[in-house]
Image: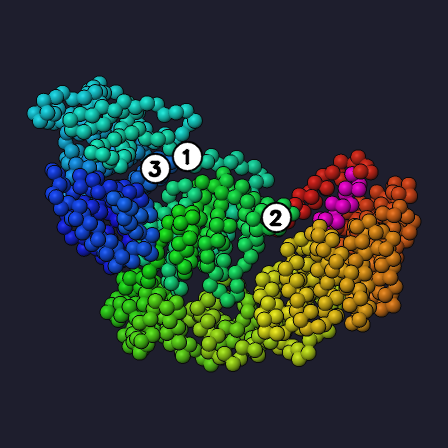
Amino acid sequence: MEFRLLGTVAVETHTGPLPLGPAKRRSLLAALLLSANTPVSIGRLMDSLWDDTPPLQARSVIQGHVSRLRALLVGADAEAYGVELVTLGDAYVLRVPETLVDAQRFEELLMLAREQRSPADTVLMLKEALSHWQGPALSGAFAGPPLRAAAHSLEESRLATVELLARTYGTLGEHHRAAALLAAETSAHPLRESLAAELMLALYRAGRQSEALDRFHRTRRLLADELGIDPGPKLADAYALILRGDPVPPAAAPAARTGAPPAPSRSASSSAGAAEAPAGPPVAVADAPSGGGGTAETPPAAPRPWPAAPAVHPADPLPVDLLPRAPRGFQGRTAELAALTRAAAGESPVCLVTGPAGVGKTALALQWAHRNDALFPDGRLFADLRGFSEAGEPLLVDVLREFLLALGLPPRRIPESAPAAAALFRSLTDRRRLLVVLDNVRDSAAVRTLLPGGADCVTLVTSRHRLEGLIASDAARPVPLDTLEADDGTALLAGVLGEERVLAEPVAARRLAELCGGLPLALRVTAARLAGRPRWTLAALADELADERRRLACLDVDDTGVAAALRLTVQHLPPDAVHHFARLGHHPGGSVDPYAAAALAGTDPVVAAAALERLSDAHLVAETAPGRWVLHDLVRLYARGLDPASAHEALLGVLDHCIATALAAADTAEPGGESCFVLPDGFRRPTAVRDFTGRDEAMRWLAGERDNLALAAQAAREAGLEDRAWRIILLQWPQVVWRVRDNWAPLLELALESARAGKDAYAESRVLTLLGWVLTEEGRTAEAADLLERSPQLAREAGDPLGEATALVNLAVVQAELGELPTASENCVRAVELARREEDRHTEMLALQHLARMRLTARRPEEALACARTALNLGPEHEEAARRSLLLAICGEARLALGEEEDGIRLLDRAAREAEDAGYDEGAVRALEVLLRTTADPSYRVRHERSALRLATAP
């Protein structure tokens, strides 16, 4: 919906202009729009609708026009756009978002143009502003005195904008374009001296001196004949400059704010309405008429510049860019892209793209973001909030964490709570020019938490909901997205099939676009079917789609049109591809690889990869990275419905795939570690399990699959498969240990719920042990102690001596922090005994390491050194790099405590180097800190700073 004042007064809707009727009704609408969102009294409306004394029935006439106008707006679903005509006592108010009024958008673009640092950008903004004009302002209305004054003021603003555009052309050296623009306006306004003077100077700069002088003489004669006056100072000064042949300086571009107040401008108005000022004519800004009306010209406010770009230093991070790639084959949406540009103007704008599922909201947002990347030199952030996905919405604190990490904040500085993280995000973005794209939003509250703090940041939101709360609270500017027009739908088909094939059957192509309901997803699937079958005619496929007419008539329901197109596509797939597609619908995660697809379908990865390629060709899945595919939400729902009876079998298959692969990754990452558990009852080993060539690859897989594994565990818990849920979580222990402060507690709490629901003491003890350690590292010592107190007893009840040993070690660490050093030491000694009895060197090493540290803390360096040496003798040097580094550091500190400084420094240096070589920066920092307290060697300070920097900036 759009309200037009810059031309014929009108209300445009997606079905065409509203039939406003007589001129007085247009006058009523114009008067209300000129004072939008402000009450307009009956008396003021009478002045606008009648030129002389209003008739006795004027009040009734106005009430009738208001009633009819209100009915027209209601019938056009104006409320959906935030438009409402309200009666307030003896006045009326038209509530309307400013972005829907062309005059307001015109003024916003002028403001934006004055803020541009580049004259070329200023030209683009001014041209877009002037494009809103479609004729004389307030045409088609009966103009009483207030409306005549308003129309004059708007026209003055337009002419001043033309003059500013011409001067900016001059700044760019495009004097011929400036002259052509001014010549057209001067013909329409021959008595406006400022236009004539600007035209003379443009002609002179373009080397057309004789034409410039001729323009002066013609204007002088007109002024004398029509008004009986001589040329004013500006016209005379331009004439004198040209006669002298003085060089003319380039036209001044709009000045950026320098901190000083703008110089006062002298404004003189001739009877022709010309405005002039020494520094060039300002952009006239029309005030809303009050009382009897009138015009007001004000010098332009000093523009609000973009913040100065910060100096770039070698250590500064590059501009962040989390934006996915631009959509391929994007067609149409010219009006919506322009609407987004208008909505993005102003201070801290929130742009809201809304529409039904499958209509292309995300594609539009990404297209606009990529086209306007120059507007955001500090970067672009993107988050899929999954508001309409069965995978569930991400925690807002996790989204904020990703944003803060991308902005260069070290992980340890990121708050744990969403409100604190949001406040920090607002602070970090306060002086930046960022674009924040929030995709698939379900409610307004999520957006409010993720809004940046900078006045020059733009937030772009997509949602299936209208999010009226966001419009009310944060002035979000809605950009409704409807289905594609038939022409754009046909163009989309041509982009896939080639123009020749579409031009050969234009009627059938248009019919296809109409039968697909204008939904881009349906169009792409249909085009994919045709692209793979060059002998098919478009007409034949259109006839086939027509059989689904009853379903396609229900396109206002989220997924009906898409389901109709998908059904036709799936019918032509080979059976193995259909089988894989149906099973993919039961995948609990976000993305899938050939191993997971094979586990879902009960096949092998080679067959699954071929099926995924076939499905990708049909646009049923999308390859987001080599070997990774995703399904659109609606496609997933459709696929799930193809074979609902297989849901449990498919889920079991993918859960056991997760267990098998995570087990292989854990064994590769920590080869000396003890397996956490026996496999669950009824475990089905996949036909193939991914091989990991080394620790780095295994850790990358665990990190990359973290979200998928979490979703799989949640699905297992919901399906009553608790024995799978806690195993999938616990098998991520190498990543938990390596990235211990990476918010693992919620996932481990889910594992604890699953273990307790299954009444499994073994599982509960194992989970409590790991969760307690995580809480300890997060500084939540009291909580950790409460959990860990139960863990050793549970392990004893379950007959799990190694689990008891590990639990005792973690409990001892907490007790030591709480000052209970003797009890802690006893528990570590007990853990060593249990590990030796079970002949498990890994656990014995762990217990001895912590016992050595406790002995050192208790100022018993000889015993600490003995424990550390024993532990070092248990493991081969190529394994347990992190633990070896810690043990060597303990040995070094013990030597120092014994007065053996040279040996102590040597051992600490070795500990630091082994930690550096292994990428264990935390261990390197610890060892180097002790060295810095012991020796003045400058090389240790350099190494310490490097390790500390890597640790602080680690992702």
- Of labels 3 and 1, earlier in sequence is 3
Residue 241 sits in quarter = top left
Real-space Cα separation, disc 3 to disc 1, in angstroms:
10 Å
Residue at (72, 67) in percent of width and height: 764
Out of 724 and 565, give the one closest to the viewer: 724
Check disc 1 and report its element: helix, strand or loop: loop
Left or right: residue 693 versus residue 115 is: right
In the rendered image, residue 919 lying in the magenta stretch gets the answer yes
Real-space Cα separation, disc 2 to disc 1, in angstroms:
33 Å
Check disc 2 and report its element: helix, strand or loop: loop
Pointer 3 residue = 111
In the rendered image, residue 707 lying in the magenta stretch gets the answer no
Vertical arrangement, residue 317 with respect to residue 646, above or below: above
Q: Main secondary structure of the magenta part?
A: helix
Q: Mark 3: few, some, or many residues within 10 Å (few <14, many ≥20)?
A: many
Pointer 2 residue = 415
Residue 315 sits in quarter = top right
Say which amino acid is labelled 2. Pro
Magenta residues (range) = 917-932
Check disc 3 and report its element: helix, strand or loop: helix
Disc ID at residue 334: none
The x, y position of residue 608, in whole percent, is 53, 74
Say which amino acid is labelled 1. Pro
Q: Mark 1: few, some, or many residues within 10 Å (few <14, many ≥20)?
A: some
Image marks 2 and 3: residues in contact by CB distance under 8 Å: no
Out of 799 and 869, give the one closest to the viewer: 799
Vertical arrangement, residue 668 with respect to residue 933, above or below: below
Vertical arrangement, residue 906 with respect to residue 232, above or below: below
Pointer 1 residue = 305
The x, y position of residue 854, in whole percent, is 85, 51
Q: Mark 2: few, some, or many residues within 10 Å (few <14, many ≥20)?
A: some
The x, y position of residue 836, in whole percent, is 87, 65
